[in-house]
Image (cartoon, helix red, strand yellow):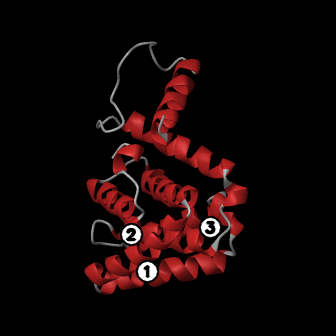
């Protein structure tokens, strides 16, 4: 059973235990447009990341996650100051990313975001190279993708452009986007 299937089953069980789902009923699937299913996935990824906090302390994870966060923030080609501040706040308050000094995170995030703002294609290529370095450890590679989901879904909505950069990051990491429902 793939990690995504386990997550999906856990989310379904959680929804049913809270009385929010009908046993045997079918809602919007992981690739459906239902915001509830995406919100559940984001919540599950956030929980899984928190449970792996002690394992996610490498520089490769830190750097790849910051590149992923910058890509998600700039996915639509525009980064408004309010969005930059919101992303900065999310990064430094994320449970797993608290393994690292906030200034290191800000520095790496800002570096990638600035490069993406100046020349999106070149900045994207550099960010993808950074993300690909996490492929050596499959658990970290998956955690980078999950971090991207958590950041993308923090506002309760995942834009198609955000999903696309996460798909491309999956490819760079040697992971199937289908494993994450995209």
Q: Residue at x 30, y 83 (%)?
A: 122
The numbered disc on residue 71 is 2
Label at residue 156: none
**Label 3–label 1 contact, CB within 8 A:** no
Instruction: State the residue at coordinates (48%, 34%).
Output: 1
Q: CA distance from mark 3 to mark 2?
A: 17 Å
| Image: 7 above or below 54 | above
Residue drawn at point x = 42 percent, y = 63 percent: 173
Q: Are marks 1 and 2 in contact (CB under 8 Å)?
A: yes
- In percent of width and height, residue 87 lies at 49, 66
29 or 129, nearer to the observer: 129
- Residue 112 circle label: 1
Q: For this view, does 69 lie left or right of residue 78?
A: right
Residue assigned mark 3? 92
Label 1, secondary structure: give it: helix
Q: Distance of mark 1 from mark 2, alpha carbons?
A: 8 Å
The one nearer the camera, 146 or 151, is 146
Furthest residue toward right: 54
Mark nearest the camera among 3 and 2 is 2
């Amino acid at each position: 059973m793939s990690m995504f299937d386990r997550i999906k089953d856990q989310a379904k069980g959680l929804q049913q235990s809270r009385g929010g789902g009908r046993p045997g009923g079918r809602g919007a699937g992981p690739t459906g447009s239902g915001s509830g299913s995406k919100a559940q996935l984001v919540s599950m990824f956030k929980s899984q990341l928190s449970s792996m906090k002690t394992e996610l302390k490498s520089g490769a994870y830190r750097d790849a996650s910051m590149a992923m966060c910058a890509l998600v923030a700039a996915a639509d080609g525009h980064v408004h100051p309010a969005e930059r501040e919101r992303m900065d706040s999310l990064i430094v308050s994320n449970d797993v990313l608290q393994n690292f000094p906030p200034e290191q995170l800000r520095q790496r995030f800002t570096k990638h975001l600035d490069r993406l703002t100046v020349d999106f294609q070149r900045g994207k290529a550099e960010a993808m190279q950074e993300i690909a370095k996490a492929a050596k450890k499959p658990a970290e590679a998956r955690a980078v993708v999950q971090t991207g989901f958590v950041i993308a879904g923090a506002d309760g909505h995942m834009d198609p452009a955000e999903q696309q950069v996460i798909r491309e990051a999956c490819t760079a990491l040697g992971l199937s986007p289908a494993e994450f429902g995209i």
